[in-house]
Every structure is written in structure tokens, then in C-alpha cells.
């Protein structure tokens, strides 16, 4: 191995050695503790220290790094107190996740590190969002994100590279090519000769670096970072290296040919660099002993702190309260000046006023800029706010959801428009596994609203007509809003944008241009989690949301003899069950109308909760009315058969007669 860079000061060269030695010695200690049963799992980065240390050393402390399993050197180079790392690995409270996640699955704003999730890919898009926030806030910074060669096969990798290239984001995509995924060799992972070649397809600068040569890693990354801070653009780096231990210790390395292990053992980044420093007389044996003794003492002292700490305490209230970031709702009262507008106009108006209120709010989505979105909700927004804040995106739903998370992490707000709610399936992973879990895992907000044009009765078929709220009401950590009227839509959208938690905001396409209402012209808010009683009666309770509310209203207009409470939920998570309980205790009967198909929908949970909490008040079975158990069809007569609106009246009258 050749160390030829003489432009790096001797003090820096010595510092790089110490920084590599520290994670190596920690790992060696962890492997002993693993065998002793004192830690539960370990993902080894032995043999790859030069990459983590070299990249982190070339970056500024205020620049974000998004590491992976094998990047202990990132954490130690950022000088995270070792007792907190050790406590994290043991599930102790003084770690970074209160025992809620393991190993390197955590982030810390204090050290500008954003940890991975096991799905790997989303963090690449998160890096895009963090870098975008830096660009918009005119911070001359670089964001570095790590992945392995296996991760480059994921769609998120390609989406994130594409977005970064199109938007000229200063993201350093660091691929540690260590030869194997868990056990899958590179020849079964990709066909091109080098991963760096993939950068060409995205119009991106790329480099191949000897990942075991600390001076080469540091020098090249340092040069690139200085250039990227002045002229933002992404760079793809492929670090050629090798994993000297299994994917995790239980995996072993039997799948690796012995001669390959021997070949790479000769390329150990620390042993070779140590020899170089000795030959250059930058280092001597006594200094090595001193460094090792100091690190050993630090490890032992901090291990004692972690081991002496008691097990994390179980506190159910705290666990439940930490799912969401605390939101201090601020009420803005609606003014007296109103205009009669459609649902679509109310949403557009609320979105525009929120953009005016929050200068750190960014709108992203397909065709939302000059075109104004397929439903024209953001028409004229580019002229008002500019293309930096109203951003057309490639068709990369997963990367854009992740980028929205990155914007939030770096101090901004994001509203993403799913062109159709159906398309959320291609961004499902970062919604339910990243956004939803951020605050519970490491206390970080997810200040993101995803707008979801949804619903049928418009003849749009199986892929443009779903009302898929149940995908998300099942996922703790998400808030789900589903207004039926223009006034509610505007006020609830304003609140959703103010809320630092992730909100899925459902907008029924069939109501966009068919429902009018007098809506206050100025800015106002409506609290989430508060249902509204639209009609009052004594004989039966009707609960619905979205288009179902209007179907129920039409039914009641045609049947004035029905004396019913009609409750519009407005928000599905949080869900205002108290309003339902209060009504059921009065009427004794409950029917729930939803547009979604029956099984597994929100109506099922409402029914169960009422049975559990109001059974003694019921005078009949709780009834659910919903669409039939098929995908939503295109032909109008088939769609009419699918939807529950014509069946509702029969079910309602049957329950009344029970």
C-alpha cells in the first residue's frame, strides 16, 4: 500500500492514526463482550476504519453525516462520549434511544449524525433533504451519507442519486464496497464493473478510492468537500475495501474463499498505516504504547459507567407520550370575512397562507411548480414563492418522502404532494418506517405533511381512486386528517403544517370541485382530533368522514323521519372517540359509514372500541357499511356497485328498526 500524500501535516497524519485505532480497539473489546454475553449483537467494521475516519475528518463538525452499521469511526471521530455509545448498545437510558433501538440505529443533533434504519435506502434521500435545506438556507456545507454495495441495488439509491443530481445538492454518496452483502458477492449484486460507473448515468462526478488507505481517503474527500461547498453538486465515491468479519458476528465468514481473506488481511488499513508512520519517523513504539494505553483506559472507564447504569425503567405513560413530539396547538380564530369557495380552493388558500406564514416551508411534488399540480392547487405558487420553495420532483416518491424528513431534520418544514394517494405505495417505507418512528426512536421531529388526493366515484379505476387511509391509521407515529368540507380543510391543513409531527392529509378528489362553503378569507386553524356533530338526534348515531359524510347527509335529507346524530370525524389519528361515546350513550345505536372496503378499515376499530366501552348503552349491534371487498373498478355501473352510498340507506333503516 502506497502512502504518497506529503501535503498533509505530520500532526494530522498522527491524528488520523489515533482516530482509526480507537474504533478498532473498541470493536475488539466489543467482540470479547459479545462472547461473554454482555452485549447482544455486533456489526463489525474491522478493516474499514479508514473510510469512516477519513470522511469524517475531512468534514466540518456542523455538517451532517448519515452512517451505517460499520461506521463506528464516524461516531468516535465526532467525539461522542463513549459511555453514551456503550449505553446505547446495551439498551440503557443514557444512550440515544432510551433503549428503543439498538446499535447504530440512532441520531443525535448534538453531533450532527443521523443514524440508519434497517431498510438502508431511505437515509440516502434524507441526505438529499438535509443538503437541500443547507442550500436553501445558504449554508456552504456538505452532507455525507454511507451505504454498502448491497444497498446500491435498492431503488432508494437510484432515486436519491437522481434527485441530488437534478437539484445540484452537495451530497457525498459514500459506498463502502466490501465485497459482500450479507453473503451475496458483488458479481450477484450488479453487472457493471464498478459502482462508481453508476454515477455517470446520473450526470454525477464519481471516484474510485482505495478505502484502506487513510491518506488517500482523507485527501480526496477533503478536496471534494472544499469544492462542493463553493459549487454545490453531488459526488459518488466508491471505496474499495473488505469486510474482515461477518455481516454480524453470528453470520461468520465461511462463504468467503480463504485466499481472499488472506489477501485482504495484508491490506489492513491500520497495520499498514502504522508501519508507514514508523518508517517516516512520525510515530515510534513508545508513542504507540502511550496511545493504546490512553484508549484502553478511556474504554474501561466508560464501560464501567455504562455497566453500572441500571436497566432502562419501564414507564408506559412515557412510552406512549414519546410517540409524537409535543405540539402546543396555537389557535388562530377565523375572521368574519368569508368567501364561497370550493374544497380545492380552500386547500390552495390554506397552503398559500401557510407558505406566507412559514418562510422555511417547502412544497415538493410532481408537476407542482409551473403546472400547478394535476389539480391546480399550487397554480401561481411559483410566481409568489419561487421555484426554490415550490419544487417539481422526479417520479421518486420514496426519495422525496425521505427528503422531506431531511428538510425537517435540518430545520425546515415540508409539504409533499402525492399526485394521487394511490402512489403512496411507492413511498410507503419511509412513511411508515422512517417518519412515523423518528420521534419515538431518537426524539427528533418529523415536520412533514403529505397531501393525499384520494377517493372514488370519479370513474378513475383501481390506481387513481383508492381511499387508503387504513394503511396509515394502523401505523403509530403518524397523524391522519380527512376533511369533508372546505372550511375544515383549510383550518386543518394550517394546523397540520404547524404540527411538528408527520401528517397524512387526505383530500377527496370527488369533493374538490363539487362542495362549496363560506370559508373565512384570513388565516385560521382548527385543532386535530376533534370531531364535529353536523346534525343532532336521539335515535341513532351515524359516524363518517370524507365523501361518506355527504352520502349520509343526502340520505338524511331524503329521510327526514330519521332522528340521528351525524358525526364527521375530520381526523382519524388522533381519533375523537369521546364524541362517539357521548353520542352512543344518548342514542343507543351506531352505524359507521366508510368509503374504504370493509375489512381492516377504521370502522372496525371504532366498532370494537364502542363495544368495549359502551356495550351497556347499546340497543342493537354496531353496524359497519363500506365498499365491497374488491379493488375499485373503472366502469361507472361497477363503481356504483362497489361504493356503499346506495346501500347505506337500507342498512340505516334496518338498524333503526332493530
Image (cartoon, grey):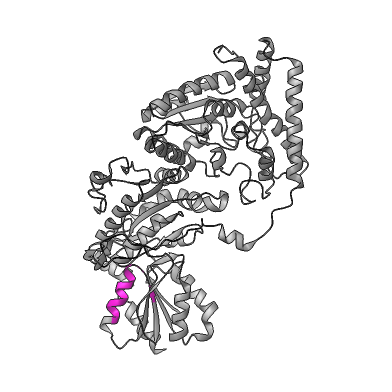
Q: Is residue 547 magenta?
A: yes
Residue 496: where, in percent of width, then height? 40, 58
* Residue in view at x 65 percent, y 22 percent: 17
Q: Is residue 73 left or right of residue 432?
A: right
Q: Is residue 185 left or right of residue 165?
A: right
* Residue in view at x 70 percent, y 33 percent: 26
Residue 60: where, in percent of width, then height? 52, 29
Residue farthest to the right, as pictured:
36
Q: Is residue 212 left or right of residue 432?
A: right
Question: Which part of the image, by quadrant, shows the C terminus?
Answer: bottom left
**Residue 573, quarter of picture:** bottom left
Q: Is residue 34 magenta?
A: no
In the rendered image of this protein, does residue 228 appear above or below residue 582? above
In the rendered image of this protein, does residue 491 appear above or below residue 62? below
The residue nearer to you, when weighing 358 against 192, is 358
In the rendered image of this protein, does residue 122 appear above or below residue 623? above
Residue 651: where, in percent of width, then height? 37, 81
* Residue in view at x 55 percent, y 29 percent: 56
In the rendered image, is residue 455 in sight? no
In the rendered image, is residue 490 in sight? yes
The residue nearer to you, when weighing 610 against 384, is 384
SS assignment for the magenta stretch, majority: helix
Residue farthest to the left, as pictured:
340
**Start-end of magenta stretch:** 543-556
Question: Which part of the image, by quadrant, shows the N terminus?
Answer: top right
Numbered-mark total: 0
Residue 445: where, in percent of width, then height? 49, 50
The residue nearer to you, when weighing 466 against 362, is 362
Amino acid at each position: 500500500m502506497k502512502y504518497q500524500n506529503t501535503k498533509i501535516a505530520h500532526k494530522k497524519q498522527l491524528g488520523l492514526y489515533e482516530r482509526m485505532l480507537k474504533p478498532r480497539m473498541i470493536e475488539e473489546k466489543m467482540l470479547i463482550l459479545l462472547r461473554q454475553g454482555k452485549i447482544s449483537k455486533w456489526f463489525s467494521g474491522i478493516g474499514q476504519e479508514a473510510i469512516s475516519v477519513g470522511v469524517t475528518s475531512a468534514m466540518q463538525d456542523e455538517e451532517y453525516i448519515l452512517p451505517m452499521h460499520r461506521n463506528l469511526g464516524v461516531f468516535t471521530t465526532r467525539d461522542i462520549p463513549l459511555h453514551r455509545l456503550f449505553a446505547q448498545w446495551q439498551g440503557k437510558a443514557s444512550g440515544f434511544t432510551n433503549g428503543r433501538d439498538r446499535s447504530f440505529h440512532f441520531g443525535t443533533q448534538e453531533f450532527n449524525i443521523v443514524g440508519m434504519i434497517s431498510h438502508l435506502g431511505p437515509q440516502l434521500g434524507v441526505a438529499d433533504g438535509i443538503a437541500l435545506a443547507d442550500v436553501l438556507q445558504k449554508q456552504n456545507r456538505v452532507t455525507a451519507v454511507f451505504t454498502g454495495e448491497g444497498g446500491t441495488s435498492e431503488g432508494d439509491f437510484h432515486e436519491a442519486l437522481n434527485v441530488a443530481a437534478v437539484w445540484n445538492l452537495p451530497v457525498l454518496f459514500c459506498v463502502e464496497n466490501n465485497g459482500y452483502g450479507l453473503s451475496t458477492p458483488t458479481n450477484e449484486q450488479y453487472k457493471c464493473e464498478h459502482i462508481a460507473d453508476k454515477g455517470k448515468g446520473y450526470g454525477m462526478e464519481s471516484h474510485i478510492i482505495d478505502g484502506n488507505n487513510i491518506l488517500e481517503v482523507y485527501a480526496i474527500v477533503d478536496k471534494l468537500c472544499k469544492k462542493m461547498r463553493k459549487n454545490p453538486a453531488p459526488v459518488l465515491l466508491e471505496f474499495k475495501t473488505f469486510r474482515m468479519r461477518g455481516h454480524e458476528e453470528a453470520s461468520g465468514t465461511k462463504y468467503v474463499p480463504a485466499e481472499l481473506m488472506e489477501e485482504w488481511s495484508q491490506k489492513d488499513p491500520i497495520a499498514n498505516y502504522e508501519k508507514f508512520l514508523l518508517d517516516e519517523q512520525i510515530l515510534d513504539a513508545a508513542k504507540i504504547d502511550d496511545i493504546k494505553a490512553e484508549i484502553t483506559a478511556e474504554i474501561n472507564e466508560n464501560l464501567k459507567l455504562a455497566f453500572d447504569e441500571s436497566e432502562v425503567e419501564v414507564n408506559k405513560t412515557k412510552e406512549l407520550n414519546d410517540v409524537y413530539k409535543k405540539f402546543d396547538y396555537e389557535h388562530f380564530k377565523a375572521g368574519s370575512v368569508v368567501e364561497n369557495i370550493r374544497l380545492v380552493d380552500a386547500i390552495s388558500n390554506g397552503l398559500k397562507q401557510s407558505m406566507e406564514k412559514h418562510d422555511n416551508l417547502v412544497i415538493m411534488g410532481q408537476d407542482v411548480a409551473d403546472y400547478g399540480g394535476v389539480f391546480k392547487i399550487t397554480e401561481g405558487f411559483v410566481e409568489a414563492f419561487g421555484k426554490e420553495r415550490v419544487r417539481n420532483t422526479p417520479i421518486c416518491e420514496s426519495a422525496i418522502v425521505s427528503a422531506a424528513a431531511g428538510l425537517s431534520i435540518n430545520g425546515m418544514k415540508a409539504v409533499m404532494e402525492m399526485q394521487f394517494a394511490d402512489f403512496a405505495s411507492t413511498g410507503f417505507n419511509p412513511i411508515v418506517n422512517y417518519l412515523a418512528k423518528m420521534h419515538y426512536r431518537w426524539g427528533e421531529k418529523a415536520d412533514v405533511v403529505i397531501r393525499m388526493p384520494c377517493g372514488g366515484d370519479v370513474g378513475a379505476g383501481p390506481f387513481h381512486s383508492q381511499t387508503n387511509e387504513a394503511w396509515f391509521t394502523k401505523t403509530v407515529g403518524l397523524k391522519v386528517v380527512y376533511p369533508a368540507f372546505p372550511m375544515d380543510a383549510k383550518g386543518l391543513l394550517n394546523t397540520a403544517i404547524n404540527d411538528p409531527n408527520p401528517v397524512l392529509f387526505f383530500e377527496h378528489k370527488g369533493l374538490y370541485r363539487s362542495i362549496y362553503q363560506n370559508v373565512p378569507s384570513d388565516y385560521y386553524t382548527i385543532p386535530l382530533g376533534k370531531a364535529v356533530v353536523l346534525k343532532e338526534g336521539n335515535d341513532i348515531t351515524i359516524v363518517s368522514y370524507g365523501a361518506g359524510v355527504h352520502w349520509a347527509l343526502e340520505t338524511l335529507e331524503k329521510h327526514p323521519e330519521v332522528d340521528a346524530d351525524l358525526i364527521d370525524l375530520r381526523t382519524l389519528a388522533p381519533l375523537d372517540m369521546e364524541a362517539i361515546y357521548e353520542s352512543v350513550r344518548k342514542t343507543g345505536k351506531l352505524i359507521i359509514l366508510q368509503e374504504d372496503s370493509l375489512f381492516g378499515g377504521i370502522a372496525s376499530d371504532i366498532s370494537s372500541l364502542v363495544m368495549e366501552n359502551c356495550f351497556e348503552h347499546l340497543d342493537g349491534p354496531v353496524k359497519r357499511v363500506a365498499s365491497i371487498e374488491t379493488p375499485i373498478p373503472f366502469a361507472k355501473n361497477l363503481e356504483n356497485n362497489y361504493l356503499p352510498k346506495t346501500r347505506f340507506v337500507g342498512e340505516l333503516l334496518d338498524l333503526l328498526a332493530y
